[in-house]
Image: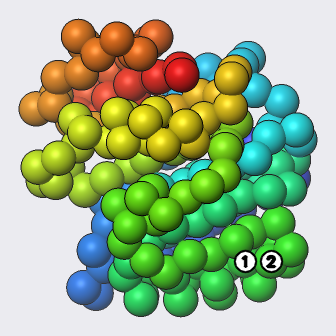
Amino acid sequence: MRIIGGEFRGHRFTPPAKNWPTRPTTDISKEGLYNILANKIDFSEIKFLDLFGGTGNHCYECISRGCEDATYVDKFPGCVAFVKTMAAKLDIEEYLDIRKMNVFSFIKSCEQQYDYIFAGPPYPLKNIPEIPDLILEKDMLTADGLLVLEHNPNVDLSSHLNLVDKRNYGQTIFSFFKA
């Protein structure tokens, strides 16, 4: 895996493969997503939230592009440990708030708003279609904020009232939501 753009562009990282509970966003689909986001977001002015953060891939990407306020949430100890190691290696600890907790518990207790939220849940998770509503009902997006939910073709969000765009990269789909 690699960081696509910004200060750390081209930096490669490899999470431990043994018993790794994630399905990282592929470089090809991530590059497509960030090409879209680069036209919509000034990364140096956003507050970013990465739900089901896994490897921390999206936090590194946003921080590399200038974000100085990123929050990472994942419940798996190995993932959290890896992200702490990467944050130290990239010297970005001051920009990254790492939370080891269940994403749904985080959403339930969240009292902050974010300009950009990325959610990359495990594809087998049954309640993926509920995630946009949970975030929107908690008023977690700023007025111009953007939620991007990564999912596979088995999840159909096309009739969601807040869906503003959808991009398909093979088995990876990014659905874009606004408040």
Residue shown at the point (58%, 65%) measured from the top left: 72
Question: Label 1 belongs to which residue?
Answer: 87
Residue shown at the point (53%, 89%) measured from the top left: 81
**19 or 117, nearer to the observer:** 117
Residue 44, by quadrant, is top right
- The local secondary structure at tag 1 comes to helix
Residue 134 pos. (x, y %) = 36, 42
Residue 111, above or below 153 = below
Residue 100, above or below 118 = below
Label 1 neighbour load within 10 Å: few <14, some 14-19, many 20+? some
**62 or 147, nearer to the observer:** 147
Looking at the image, is mark 1 or mark 2 earlier in the sequence?
A: 1
Question: Label 2 belongs to which residue?
Answer: 93
Q: Amino acid at mark 1?
A: Ala
Residue 132, by quadrant, is top left
Residue 5, above or below 132 = below
User: Label 2 near label 1: C-beta < 8 Å?
Assistant: yes
Q: Amino acid at mark 2?
A: Glu
**111 or 179, nearer to the observer:** 111
Can residue 61 be seen here? The reply is no
Residue shown at the point (46%, 33%) measured from the top left: 136
Q: How far apart, in angstroms, are the residues tagged by discs 1 and 2?
A: 5 Å
- Mark 1 vs mark 2, foreground winner is 2
